Amino acid sequence: MYLKKRGINLFNYIMKTRIKEFRARKNLSQSELARESGVARETVGLIERSQFNPSLLLAHRLAHALGTTLDETFQFTPGDLLWKRKTTKRRRTTKKSSAPKRTRKKKLTKKQRADLKIHNNITSELSRNMFRI
């Protein structure tokens, strides 16, 4: 809130990493750097491509493994919004409803209707007699 009143918007800053540059200077592979800093190789790749923001502890470990400081390794620069929504073109399809389709009731034959009537009469008679004391 304080920063917003002062006209500083932290969401307009992008954290750029120079891990790839420092890793190339020391001739380290992603897996070697990951082993030294105690993370998975995929994590180092995601951080290099700015697809993952490391915690302060992880950033410190990476900077220490590269022999640099946090300020040199990670830099905040003004830019576009940090979280941009990726827009992809979608094919327009007919919307399928999640509700089950209504089906027509099948017409009963005369015999089925008579059997159903007898069944209903018997069940109602039984339920009436069950509660008589």
Image (spheres, rainbow, N blue to C red):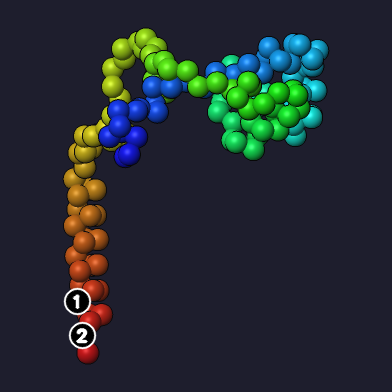
Q: What's the residue type where badge 1 is placed?
A: Arg
Question: In which quadrant will I find the C terminus?
Answer: bottom left
Q: Is residue 130 above or below residue 42?
A: below
Side (left or right) of 53 relative to 105: right
Q: Quadrant of residue 92?
A: top left
Residue 132's tag is: 2
Side (left or right) of 52 relative to 94: right
Residues marked 1 and 2 touching at CB (< 8 Å): yes
Q: Nearer the viewer, residue 80 or 52?
A: 80
Q: Is residue 118 above or below residue 133?
A: above
Residue 7's tag is: none
Residue 19 screen position, x and y as percent:
66, 18
Q: Is residue 20 above or below residue 124?
A: above
At x 24%, y 67%, the residue is 123
At x 71%, y 23%, the residue is 68
Q: Quadrant of residue 21?
A: top right
Side (left or right) of 3 relative to 117: right
Q: Is residue 103 above or below residue 132?
A: above
Q: Residues within 10 Å of mark 2 (few under 14, many from 20)?
A: few
Q: What's the residue type where badge 2 is placed?
A: Arg
Q: Nearer the viewer, residue 4 or 30?
A: 4
Q: Quadrant of residue 120?
A: bottom left
Residue beneath disc 1: 128
